[in-house]
Amino acid sequence: MFIPHLTLVGAGPGDPELITLKALKAIRNAAVILYDALANDTLLEYANPDAITRFVGKRYGCHALSQHEINELIVGYAFSHGNVVRLKGGDPFVFGRATEEIDAARQAGITVSVVPGISSALAVPASQMIPLTSRGINESFWVTTGTTQSGEISPDIALAAKSSATVIILMAMSRLEAIMDIFNANGKGETPVAIIQDGTTPKEKIVLGKVKDIYFRSLHAGLANPSIIMVGDVVALHPSLITHYAGQQNMLTRVAEKR
């Protein structure tokens, strides 16, 4: 007799090596794995050969199944096979709609556990050597989604644009121009911006710029989802920018010495 159970597992930001040991153990012990588009499918190599693996494609612009259908699969497989793993990109509780799946399982009498994952909001900037906070530059960071459930730009964007915090915006490439207009309207036109696509993977691409020009730079580079948008003075600490500014400073020093 199967004991129905759901484990929500964070698959990390994309690099399959950025997953926890506890997450790998959960994958190995799963009878069924329902995985997202943002979860690296090479992680399925750790699954039991007899396990059912099913793609349920949840990310912006990619919905193989509705959330209601996914909930029904979780409940159905839990009762028919026992241990179901819901493998989600990043961390299950960072814009992962985990609470909806937990509610569906609990209402059906299914026990639930969670294995946290490394969120792309933290790992992707780190992979590019950009800190979220740095002493003397900022004291906090925001992580926000670009749009609300209705598709409108989140009102938190306007609040974040008024602060000195680093702002990480997820799932927002389709509204990039309008979002940068909000920052520009709050006097942030010269604030550095980084957009990182497919972070921590071999396909990773990055475009650096400022609020006033990042939209056009991203268009020229052909950036698309999945990307994170990072706005804040800490972006200037990216190694390429440090080298650039250091080179400019050295040139100015040499000119001054000649005088």
Image (cartoon, rainbow, N blue to C red):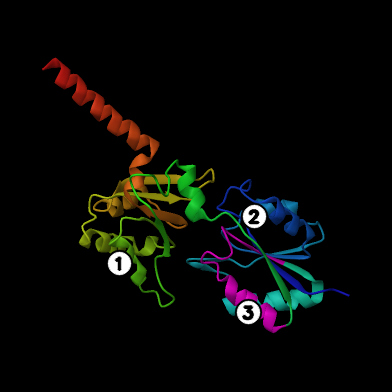
Question: Which residue occupies the foreground of this view, 233 or 97?
Answer: 233
Report helix, strand or loop for mark 2. Answer: helix
Query: In which quadrant of the rendered view does residue 91 lie?
Result: bottom right
Query: In which quadrant of the rendered view does residue 257 lie?
Result: top left
Q: Which residue is mark 1?
A: 158
Say which of marks 1 and 2 sits in front. Answer: 1
Name the residue at 37% across, 63% down. 174
Tell me the distance, in whole angstroms, between the alpha carbons under discs 3 and 1. 31 Å
Q: Which residues are magenta?
A: 85-108
**Residue 107 located within the stretch drawn in magenta:** yes
**Disc 2 residue type (three-letter):** Asp
Q: Which residue is mark 3?
A: 103
Tell me the distance, in whole angstroms, between the alpha carbons under discs 3 and 2. 26 Å
Question: Which residue occupies the foreground of this view, 124 or 174?
Answer: 124
**Disc 1 residue type (three-letter):** Ala
Q: Which residue is mark 2?
A: 41
Name the residue furthest left: 259
> Residue 130, percent across and down?
42, 44
> Residue 228, percent across and down?
43, 55
- For disc 2, the neighbor class at 10 Å (few under 14, some 14 to 19, many from 20) is some
Question: Which residue occupies the foreground of this view, 254 or 220?
Answer: 254
